[in-house]
Image (tube, grey):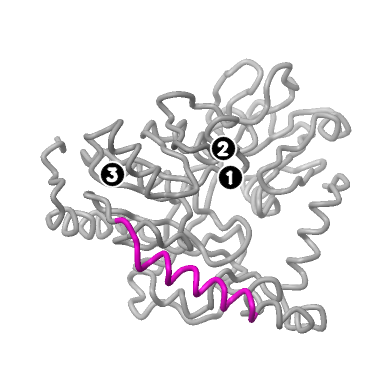
Amino acid sequence: MSQAARPSLRRRGEDWLQAVWRTRGLASALLTPFAWLYGCLSARRLRRQARHAWQAPVPVVVVGNILVGGTGKTPVTAAICQHLRAQGWHPGVLSRGYGIAAGTTARLSDTDTSGAYLGDEPALLHAATGVPVAVHPRRAQAAQALLAAHPETDVLIADDGLQHRALARDVEIIVQDARGTGNGRLLPAGPLREPATRLRQAHWLITHLAPGEPLPAQATLTDPARCLTLRLAPERLVHLASDQSRTWAQWFAEHGQSPCSAAAGIGQPERFFGMLRQAGLRLAATLSAPDHQAPGTAALRRLPPGPILITAKDGIKYTAPIDPRLWVVYPSAQFSDPHWFTALENDISRIAETRPHKQGNRH
């Protein structure tokens, strides 16, 4: 039977908040005055940013969420970049770069591709897609730096940044998960950064579901054709110490019947564990760490003997010496409507025709 290693104090605090945010109980009710204040200040900030927003000379697609915690924005961003590249586009990725010290200039993947320099998610996106990445809290500044360094770029994809209106956007893709809008309240009384009605303003709504999770019951877009689901499945694994790669089928044939553990420092670690179980793996133990914080080596040593499967987001954080039991799982994104990329590309093409930066670089 699978057992969970004792999570960190911060992880337990995050889990407690998630439990509070599922209902409109006493703890949530006591926080509603602060939620009202947060809503007022946030709306004012967003209006101020929108009044002075910078418009890029190329289409801008924002992939974001209104829900606190990981919803699956990064795999959606990676899938969009991979599709556009295959169709002859030259996408570039913009990111805030969570956890890194922002300087006066944007950081580019041309300089350094490590997670320590770019941040874990931007580094992961560059590694997964090969597209140039620019990082800065001011997304317009990141966009300008990326376009200057890569003038061939003809579409910008902002990973996160839905609540950053200083960069004008042309297409908004909101990614949520089975939590939906939680208890429907704003921070800190609930899990929302913006009111639930914000979902209706998106061009696309993607719901990331773990195995067996149903769609949340809530209002969505008026156009159901622009609402779809995303599920992840393990596709490839890389042995972190040796860089040896295996398909999921190959790895499972070699290790699937032996005791294995899984560790994750992401927003929703249970979703990662559920994906592995759905693929047929019996986990002897699981270990959760706070989002953006890879499970520590001491905690990993306490896991039972056998392979330890970790997320790609965590894998880029480990440096030598590396625990020889670690295998990084690279999943594939499976959308309920695989043809949605064509509709998205058509939207981008129409927008590109109205911009001074034409599609002349495409081939």
Q: Left of 244 or right of it: where is 285?
A: right
Residue wearing tag 2: 119
Where are the magenta residues, as a range? 36-54
Determine the secondary structure under disc 2: loop
Q: Which of marks 2 and 3 is nearer the N terminus?
A: 3
Q: Label 2 sits on what residue type? A: Gly
Q: Which mark is drawn over residue 84?
A: 3
From the top left corner, tell me how far across and down residue 161 is, in percent.
Answer: 46, 56
**137, 71: nearer the viewer:** 137
Q: Main secondary structure of the magenta part?
A: helix
Residue wearing tag 1: 98
Q: Dot 2, how many residues are within 10 Å of its Cα: few (below 14), some (14-19), or many (20+)?
A: many
Q: Dot 3, how many residues are within 10 Å of its Cα: few (below 14), some (14-19), or many (20+)?
A: some
Q: Dot 1, how many residues are within 10 Å of its Cα: few (below 14), some (14-19), or many (20+)?
A: some
Up/down of 112 relative to 30, above or below: above
Q: Which of marks 3 and 1 is nearer the N terminus?
A: 3
Q: Label 3 sits on what residue type? A: Leu
In magenta segment, residue 14 = no
